[in-house]
């Protein structure tokens, strides 16, 4: 899908009132060029558009840069607490909905505002601050080298399933004391969770079961990891709060970094501006990292804010209890701040909203960049002649209303045996 269908009704059409022809949000993230979809949606609606999350469940997609800053900074009007979601309270959203693992209220930092948010945010900030970046970089490089060594002799690989999805899982899981087998189980559970489909709730349950087992093991046998740090943090008052703090850091970190690695590698392999880097071009990995955040942020669309009163946003009447989705990819493409394709993508420009904004801005931007940069650099260094083995426009995307992750990135390269010098 490259644009909205020809018969897509304008916002004035009565069909919008009944939601029968609203754009499914997953259709945008799964499009070959989602910016074209968002641009058409903006042309029809303006900066705030009504979309469909699942059949019969509607939301406002906030696509304006300034409007997105408004809803992320005004907690007194736009809450993170999903218990304010009218459609959920009224039974419009089924208790079995695949949306709930991503959108339902949890006793964690994501679902809190004000002082409660600050209390639950501090353990995450403290956890990130205690990461030894030099040690972490060596560990990530070791993980990357070992993964590449497993397929380097074959002369071909899938950079998503064999690399980009595994690197952040093993890297972040190790910070919490999880082994590689548990990391692989987490990966399968997270794919289901972020898909927001029929298996989403099962994936969420299995994800939490793995983390609960780890928590209880660390209570009996403390070690020097983030799980133990959460157990001992004075701001976390129960097993549920410790569990949900782990859920936030692991789920957002692994899926988001997977997307960031995948998109950066795709740019390095297919975009002439970055591919030339391998032959002495001026744009390198750091430029590609930033460009990926502008064009395909780790969360294309981020749930959610809930209106605490009737208000107006971007010319739209927002009712109390309405749900608003942060259209991060669309906001990064807002012509008010990016009048042409390249103006905001200049090297070093980091005014994007890829990590959100306001009190809920991502706390782990530094380790996320460390993992992503190390993963991309290691792949380019060890496989310098790799090429995408399918046309760039044939890359398929995993179905999700939130994230935009390639199903696969098949590559070919000169077969070689990679020596492993573990530093873990």
Image: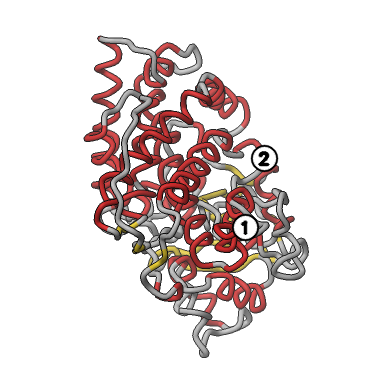
Tell me how far mark 1 sits from mark 2, CA to CA: 39 Å
Q: Which mark is residue 94?
A: none
Point out the residue furthest to the bottom here.
6
Question: Residue 367 placed where, x, y %?
Answer: 53, 34
User: Which residue is under mark 1?
Assistant: 280
Disc 1 packing (10 Å; few <14; some 14–19; many ≥20): few
Residue 291 left/right relative to 100: right
Disc 2 packing (10 Å; few <14; some 14–19; many ≥20): some
Question: Mark 1 or 2 closer to N-term?
Answer: 1
> Does 373 sit above or below residue 290?
above
Whether residue 324 appears in this view of the structure is no
Whether residue 249 appears in this view of the structure is yes
> Does 82 sit above or below residue 113?
below
Question: Residue 216 placed where, x, y %?
Answer: 26, 18
Q: Which mark is residue 358?
A: 2
**Quarter occupied by residue 139:** top left
> Does 261 sit above or below residue 333?
above
Question: Residue 111 placed where, x, y %?
Answer: 50, 37
Q: Which quadrant, please, contains the N terminus?
A: bottom left
Could you say which is closer to the camera, residue 213 or residue 103?
213
């Amino acid at each position: 899908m490259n644009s909205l269908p020809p018969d897509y009704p304008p916002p004035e059409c009565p069909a919008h009132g009944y939601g029968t022809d609203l754009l499914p949000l997953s259709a945008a993230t799964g499009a070959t060029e989602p910016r074209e979809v968002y641009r058409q949606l903006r042309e029809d609606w303006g900066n705030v558009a009504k979309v469909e999350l699942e059949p019969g469940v509607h939301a406002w997609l906030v696509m304006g840069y300034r409007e997105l800053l408004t809803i992320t900074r005004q907690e007194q009007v736009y809450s993170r607490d999903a218990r304010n979601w009218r459609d959920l309270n009224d039974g419009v959203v089924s208790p079995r909905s695949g949306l709930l693992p991503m959108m339902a209220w949890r006793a964690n930092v994501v679902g809190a505002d004000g002082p409660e948010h600050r209390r639950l945010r501090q353990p995450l900030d403290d956890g990130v601050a205690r990461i030894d970046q030099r040690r972490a970089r060596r560990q990530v490089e070791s993980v990357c080298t070992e993964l590449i060594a497993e397929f380097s002799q074959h002369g071909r690989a899938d950079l998503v399933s064999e690399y980009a999805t595994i690197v952040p899982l093993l890297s972040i899981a190790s910070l919490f004391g999880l082994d590689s087998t548990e990391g692989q189980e987490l990966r399968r559970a997270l794919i289901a969770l972020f898909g927001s489909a029929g298996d989403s709730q099962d994936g969420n349950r299995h994800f939490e079961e793995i983390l609960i087992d780890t928590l209880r093991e660390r209570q009996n046998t403390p070690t020097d990891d983030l799980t133990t740090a959460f157990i001992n943090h004075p701001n976390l008052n129960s097993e549920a709060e410790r569990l949900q703090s782990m859920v936030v850091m692991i789920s957002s970190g692994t899926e988001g970094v997977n997307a960031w690695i995948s998109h950066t590698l795709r740019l390095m392999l297919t975009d002439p501006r970055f591919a030339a880097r391998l032959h002495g071009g001026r744009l390198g990995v750091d430029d590609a990292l930033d460009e990926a955040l502008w064009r395909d942020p780790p969360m294309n669309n981020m749930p959610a804010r809930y209106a605490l009163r009737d208000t107006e946003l971007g010319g739209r009447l927002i009712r109390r209890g309405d749900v608003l989705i942060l259209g991060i990819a669309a906001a990064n493409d807002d012509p008010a701040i990016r009048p042409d394709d390249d103006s905001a993508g200049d090297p070093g420009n980091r005014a994007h909203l890829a990590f959100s904004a306001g009190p809920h801005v991502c706390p782990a931007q530094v380790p996320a960049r460390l993992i992503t940069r190390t993963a991309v650099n290691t792949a380019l260094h060890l496989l310098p002649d790799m090429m995408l083995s399918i046309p760039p426009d044939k890359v398929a995307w995993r179905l999700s209303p939130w994230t935009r992750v390639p199903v696969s990135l098949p590559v070919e390269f000169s077969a070689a045996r990679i020596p492993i010098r573990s530093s873990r």
